[in-house]
Image (cartoon, rainbow, N blue to C red):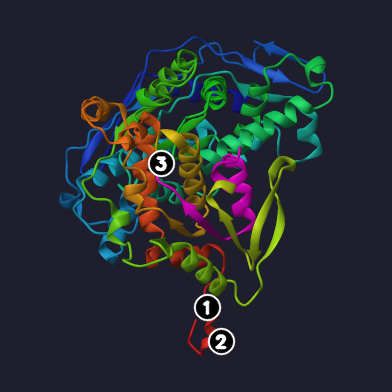
Amino acid sequence: MRSAARALRAARLHSADVRNTAAVAGRSFSLRADPPQAQPKLFVSSSRCTRDFEGPLLPKDLKVFSRKFSVSASVSLAENDNVSGEQRGPLAEYQRRIASGDLKPGDKFQEDALRALQALYDVLYSTSEEVGLEKASWESRNGSSGSWFSRLMPRVQWNAQPSVRGLYLYGGVGTGKTMLMDMFFDELPKTWRKSRIHFHDFMLDVHSSLQDRMSYEGFKTRSQADPLAVVADEILKEAVLLCIDEFMVTDVADALILNRLFDHLFKRGTILVSTSNRHPDQLYEGGLQRDLFLPFIANLKSRCVVHEIGSSIDYRKLTAAEQGMYFVGPNASELLHLKFGQITDGEEPRPTTAELRMGRTLQVPLAADGCALFQFHELCDMPLGAADYIGLFEKFHTLALDGVPKFGSHNRASAYRFTTLIDVMYEHKARFMCSAEATPVELFEKVLPISEAPKQKRTSSRSNNPEDADILIDNDLGFTKDRTISRLTEINSSEYQEDHAIAYNRLPNPAATGTDA
C-alpha cells in the first residue's frame, strides 16, 4: 500500500504542467510539458496470451506527456571557456580537446551543432528513467532480469509516444559531423541502451533480420504481425537510442523498409541521432515510388530536431599527405602492383574465395596477408552491394583497386557502387590503394546535381565535343561525390593510416623496437 501511494503521488507530480529551464553553455533551452495526452493502456503479454489490461494497476489520474527540446545557438563558446571537472557531455569534451590542442578553436558551425547535441544530452539525462535508457531498470520493468521468478511474470510495456525528440545533423563533407556525433555517443553512460552504427551496416542488419523472420518456419501462420514490427522489437531490446552515421537512401527497397520500420520504432520510443549530407526533404529525391517514402520524411522531421552544420573548411583535406597510394599516369597499374607486393610482408599473393554474409561468396583474384587486389570491374561492374563490401572488409584490412575510370552517364551504376565501396572502406578504417584514370576530383567532373544541369545543358548543346554527351545529371551522385572525393583525399593522410593501424592492431611492437610502451 505504501509503495502504491508513493507511485500515485509521483504520478500526480509528474502530470503537473511545468516548465523547466536549464543552462547549457551560457544560454538556456526550454523543457516543455505539452498538454495531457489520452491515458495509455498497459500491455500485458505472456507466452500464452496477449491482451489489453486496464485494471487498478494503472492509476486513474496517470498522464503521459510529450516533452520536446528546442535549440537556440546564439552564444559563442568563447564566452564559456571554463570547464569544471564536474561538467560532462560533448560540449565539455570539445572544450577539453581544444585545450589539449587536439582540435582547433573558432569553428562556429561546429559549436552550434555541439549546443544542439549538449541540449539533447542533458534532456536524456533528466529523462533516462522515463524513456528506458538504463539497462537495469528497463530489464527489471520488462521481466528480463534472468531470474526464474521474473520469467514467470508477464511483460509490461507502455504503449505511449516517446517523450524526447532526437537530432538530425546534416551538412557538407568534411565538416566534422561524424566526429561530433561520436563525441556525443562516447560521453553517454555505458549502462544505457544505446547503439552507434553506420547506415549501411544498419540496413544490412535489418535485411538480415527480415530474412530470418520470413524464413522462420510457420512464422506467417503463427502470427499475423508485421515482420518489421518484430524487427523493431528486436532493435529496441538492444537500444532505445540509435546513432546512425551517414544516413542516405538510394534504394527503393530501403526506402519502403525505412518508412514502416521507423514508424514502429518511433511509436515504441526510439530516439534517433543521425548525420547526413542531405536535408530530410532531399532524402531519396527522384527515387522510384518516392510518394511512399514521404510519410517517413514527415515522421523523421516530427521526431527529430533538424540542424544544419555548415563549414567552409574540409578538415579531411587539412591532414591529407601530398603523396600516398593513389596512382595516376601511364605507369599507375605497374606502381600499384609493385606497392601491393611490398605490403604483403613477403607472402605470395594467390587467388582465393572469400565467404561473405548471408551465404554469399566472392572470388578474390589476389590475396595475401590480409590484403586483396581487384580489377575495378570485378568489384564495381558486378551486381554487388554494401553487404558484399562489408563482408569483404571483415576479411581484408587492405584493398588495392586497379583501373578506376572517370565516371559519366555510361557507367552510372559503377559510380554508385564505387561511392558505396569507399563509404564502407572508410567506416571500417581499411587501407585503400588504387590506380586511376584521373585525380579524385577529375573522376567525378562529369557527374552533376540537378541544380547545375541547366547551365551544363546549354553549354553542351553548342559543343561539338562528343565527351559532353557523357554528362551524368544525378542528384544523389552529385551530393555523394563530394564525400567520396574528400575520403579519397583523407585516406592518404598519416592520421588515417594511424587509425587504420590501431583498428587492425598493426602498430609496431614497442618491445621489438626497444622503445617504451
Mark 1 touches mark 2? (CB < 8 Å) = yes
Give the residue at x 42% y 21%. Answer: 297
At label 1, the amino acid type is Pro
The quadrant of the image that shows the N terminus is top right
Q: Residue at x 42, y 49 (%)?
A: 182
Q: Residues within 10 Å of mark 1 (few under 14, many from 20)?
A: few
Is 90 magenta? The answer is: no
In the image, is 336 to the left or to the right of 146?
left
Give the labeled residue for mark 1.
508
User: Which residue is disc 2 drawn over?
Assistant: 512
User: Secondary structure under badge 1?
Assistant: loop
Three-letter code for the amino acid on which mark 3 is drawn: Phe
Q: Residues within 10 Å of mark 2 (few under 14, many from 20)?
A: few
Residue extent of the magenta highlight: 379-407
* Circle 2: residue type: Ala
Q: Which residue appears farthest toward the front when viewing the image?
A: 464
* Cβ–Cβ under 8 Å for marks 1 and 3: no
